Amino acid sequence: MTIHSVIRLALVLFAAASILLPPALQAADNPDVLTGVTTGQQKIYKQNITAAKKRAVDQALSQAVQNAFAAIVSRQVFASNLEFLYDRLLPGARDFVTTYRVLDSIQYKDSYLVGVESKINLDLLERRLQEARILKSGKDKPTVLFFIAEQTPEDILPKYWWGNNPEPYTSLADTELKKALTGNRVAFTVKGRDFPDPSYYNITFSSIYDEAAAMDLGRALKADLVFIGKAGASESFNRMGDEKAFDAVVDIRGYDLASGTAVIHTKTNATATSQTEAEGIVQALTQAAGAAGQELMQKIDQFWSQTLRKENSFNVAIEGENFLPRFLALKRRFQNIRDIQNMQPREIGSSHAVMEITYKGSPEQFANAVLLKTFEGFGIEIAEVSEEGIHIRFVETREDAGPEEILSETDAGETTEKNEN
């Protein structure tokens, strides 16, 4: 079997297994771009290979956008917004594709297969999700604050940016951790070297690892999780010729600010070899912090998904014109929303109602699910969302506009053209 045949066979197997394997996505040098490899498979009709190839490429790009959507939001938010994904995102999948290239393509039986590497514009995708209020408050991705003290052989004491005698520095471990978490459902209170001054918030650290002070500063900065830890590297006793070995360790504990308890812990080690100490230290710390970031990503996602999925009871106040038929239509839509555990009326009047909802998720998640529903002859406005409840108003749609309103717009000479490009 030739090398080319092996590649083609691998493509066939990859296409067959792609629905079973998680997407191989990774952040590129630009944190706002996600790179991945996906496949497409389309039947060939009337020997039109060109058309089949185009459809297969489109399918692969749609899969890449779907993977990017899954990388941005939690699993539960992804599952509850499938309608939005298929109706609003995938039909315009190419809008989110920065670049792509076909790695290989073959005709296999009566189908055409392609393997495509693409880069997805995460910034644009997140803006679309924010416009749809799926990521309105950012709570689908927790905000985190890192306190990483770092020490290398040239440091007498650990370096850190907080506390009584901080030293401005660029922590290699902090940088690598953020790089590993970028684009993976995590936001940061501190970007770059713009570190906050704890004294500005009247917060004093009694020690480097003062957990209470770190959590107080995290709350002041509107963080959801704080991570306190240490990173260090030193030369090992092992060596081979001119090559020296260097060991690094990153030990981090994460605290949930809502409960004030430790909820995540990770400790990773790495060893690198180099002829120079500076290069060996950097390599070892980079590897240990990168591995810690990957482990943290999974643990944060699991913890935050469980947090968002806690069962909540809250009130939904509803009001508006032509109330009763619209209220009944809205209730039917409520019954189709996943994870509603219970729904009981508390007040019902001629132009308003209050429903008590028990839902596996936050009020904001429920509001986002409702907002994606469509109604015949009217729309809804989410007037207010809080931890206590949601306020919904019925609004008129274009179909409800009276003849006088339509005539006045026509007289004003206003026209709207649909952009087909």
Image (cartoon, rainbow, N blue to C red):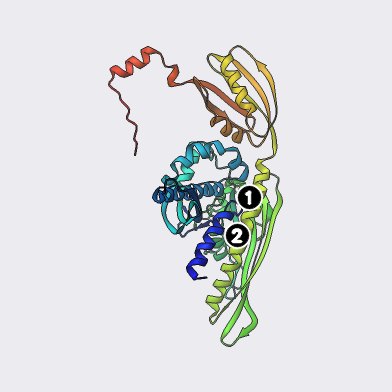
Number of other residues with Cα within 10 Å of mark 1, as a class: few under 14, some 14 to 19, many 20 or more? many
Q: Is residue 163 visible?
A: no
Q: Which residue is mark 2?
A: 293
Split into 4 quadrants, where in the image is the C terminus?
A: top left
Q: Residue at x 27, y 21 (%)?
A: 413
Front-most of residues 334 and 171: 334
Label 1 – label 2 distance at C-alpha: 12 Å
Q: Please name the amino acid that badge 1 sits on.
A: Asp
The picture places residue 113, in percent across and down from the top left corner, at: 48, 54
Query: Eyeballing the image, is 171 above or below 404?
Result: below
Secondary structure under tag 2 reads: helix
Front-most of residues 364 and 33: 33
Front-most of residues 167 and 276: 276
Query: Which comes sooner in the sequence, label 1 or label 2?
Result: 2
Q: Which residue is mark 1?
A: 301
Q: Residue at x 28, y 17 (%)?
A: 411
Which label sits on residue 367? none
Query: Eyeballing the image, is 82 above or below 352?
Result: below
Q: Please name the amino acid that badge 2 sits on.
A: Gly
Number of other residues with Cα within 10 Å of mark 2, as a class: few under 14, some 14 to 19, many 20 or more? many
Secondary structure under tag 1 reads: helix
The picture places residue 72, in percent across and down from the top left corner, at: 54, 47
